[in-house]
Image (spheres, helix red, strand yellow):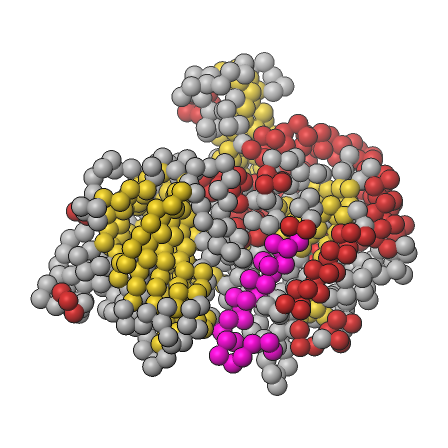
Amino acid sequence: MSILFDKERETFFLETEHSCYQFRITRHGTLQHLYYGRPVGETCMDYLTRFADRGFSGNPYECRHDRTFSLDLLPQEYSSFGMGDHRVPALKTVLENGSRTAELRYLSHEILPGKLCPEGLPHVRQGHSACETLVVRLFDEVSGLTVKLFYSIFPAEDVIVRSAQIINGSGQKIVLEKAASASIDFPCGQWDLIHFAGRHCMERQPERAALGHHVLSVGSSRGMSSHHNNPFVILCDREVTEDSGDCYGFMLMWSGNHRAEAELDQAGGVRLVMGIHEDGFSWLLEPGESFRTPELILTYAAGGLNALSHNCHRLLRENVCPPEFRHSRRKVLLNNWEATYFDFDTDKILSIAAQAKDLGVDLFVLDDGWFGQRSDDKAGLGDWFVNEKKLPGGLARLGSALNGMGLDFGLWIEPEMVNEDSDLYRAHPDWALRDPGRAPMVARDQLVLDMGRTEVREYLFGCIDRLLKEAPICYLKWDFNRSVANLFSSALPAERQGETATRFMLGTYALLFRLREAHPGVMIEGCAGGGGRFDAGMLFFCPQIWCSDNTDAVQRLRIQKGTSYGYPVFTMGSHVSAVPNHQTGRSVPLGTRAVVALSGTFGYELDPGKLTGAEKAAVRDQIAVFHKYSELIRSGRYYRLDRTEAEEGFTAWAFVSEDRCEALVSVVDTNVEGNPRFHHILLKGLVPDAVYRLEGSDRRFSGAALMYGGYTLPQMFGDYPAAMLHFAADHNAAYDE
Ligand code: GLA
């Protein structure tokens, strides 16, 4: 049993294999968080909390004679605004009379087998995992508001999935101004927050900040999870390294506006609140209505950041990504975007495709520009009808020609967007989000459709369903190329305008649910100007996401490494593109470009006709390497090996098979010096007393030697040299610890 309620101590014990989470009902009916961390046996961790009368930290009325009981000081389970907890709240409400206070007290709880799945939201699937769910009901007597807190425990995965539902059981209207998915208070510790910041073409760069007496707030109000701040943060001990120390991952299953707030309080405790961003958010609850927050994935690891990443990777692979693609080998694709941009016709496409096929490519993806009057990025979005001038005979003819060559067919779309210069916008200007009487904010000449409207979703479903039926399309690249502004929906009354951004995201999810159900065999690759919507919400529908519009291999090293803290390599769209690179102007050798792209879904984004004979031969070899190692890359444990503080410009990483019999190490040197030093790596995750052989040599090493003594690489020369090393255990037996 992973959930225990100790009646005597009124304490909940939530246990996973390597973590334990405790909270209790206080004598005044509030929920007090006690502990989250390494298992501690049966000890109740209430002794960690010390009670003191601190000035200016008031007391609930019923304990006014006990000045040591203050909601301002006690660690809470789900903090609400108004009753004297002056730290960052999880819940903010407004009653009809204007009162902004919510006072939540324990009402009841139940422990249920399995995972409860929130309707209309992407969620952690139970899959083959054992799981139990605790539902705790909290009640505010004055307003009649009920809050349900959900805790689904995945013991083997070391994961707790939290979410909340706010139910208006009163006879009056209640407005939510903030409804976070969870808050969690750590009573003590020295903490850093790691978050993943960036910009278009430079996504998910880790930043680490010590928590102080301020609110550290990271998030996005761009209507998308964004290039700028990812909905994944890590709270960790100040001493944490890749391989040691306590760390906690918080990953929101939501692709829209989000925020994580972390605060060190006056008593040395730390609070983390995470959920939908409150800027621009409000939600009206009529009597009887409820609001369900997105799920927040919590995971704890005692063994440093690599171990934390393993927890996230395994959960996303096994319990989040669509099951149809969980274990399947990805097809090697060629995408024509950087090869042609908008300048193509059938002949050009078929010539590129034929050469791609000859190199060993499996799937051809036709990118932007095949529809409406789309000769550049100023027109056509919304008109999802093939441009017969460019592609006579339409997608059916093109698809069957590709299939005839032995290639699968993939197609780019950008459903949530519309150009003013489009038939769709001319017919339905009110379908775009825009404020009355105001010129809209435009970006890339496009506006954003109001996905909360049923008729918009009906139109888009009709278009995409038709495309998938009329042509043999097995892959969609689903793009999203601007931030959302002008959050006004012509379909909502004034008092509900604050719901627009959330309804937008729920509408997109509704469309994705429907399409996935109608076409389960079609793989959808997520994309948003590269990696602007790389999050667990999208991964629920899309088993892979284009990691960045920046295809420069040197920059990709940083982008993919940053992404790897939360997300598995096999979800990262990664292609070899032409040089000089279109984003940076840099020229990186073809071999290095492939080493970097191989740590991803792998494919090409170039015109194969421009490759020399030698380069074509190299590409054939690269595809063979992909086939050889794709299973190890997909299912192996990913370790970040480099110690960047010591060796700037040297990046190393490895995949180690689950049975630890095989390791594939990749290294890239982006800073070759004169009289170069030898790079030295320490492998990780091997069996110490197993014997491994380095492929291509007769050398044998014990796992211990490779992990504790390490391996010294030959000197590396030239521009951005790279290498891959494969170590395999001498026999295939699975090793004991
Ligand atoms: C975005 C994508 C690119 C490409 C273009 C097409 O930027 O990230 O890969 O599809 O749109 O307009």
Q: Is residue 494 left or right of residue 477?
A: left
Q: Is residue 53 above or below residue 280?
A: above
Q: Give how far across and how far down residue 400 sits, in percent.
A: 86, 45
Q: Residue at x 70, y 41 (%)?
A: 603
Q: In which of the image's four quarters is ligand 1 placed? A: bottom right
Q: Residue at x 51, y 56 (%)?
A: 119
The residue stretch that appears in magenta: 490-516
Q: Give how far across and how far down residue 426 sits, in percent.
A: 76, 76
Res 130 quadrant in image: top left
Q: Is residue 292 left or right of residue 483?
A: left
Residue 497 within the segment the image draws in magenta: yes
Count up the numbered dots: 0
Judged by its main secondary structure, the magenta piece is: helix
Q: Give how far across and how far down residue 678 sits, in percent.
A: 52, 30
Q: Is residue 71 left or right of residue 589?
A: left
Q: Residue at x 36, y 55 (%)?
A: 149
Q: Give how far across and how far down residue 107 sits, in percent.
A: 28, 58
Q: Residue at x 81, y 52 (%)?
A: 470
Towards the viewer: 390 or 711: 390
**Is residue 630 something that shows in the picture?**
yes
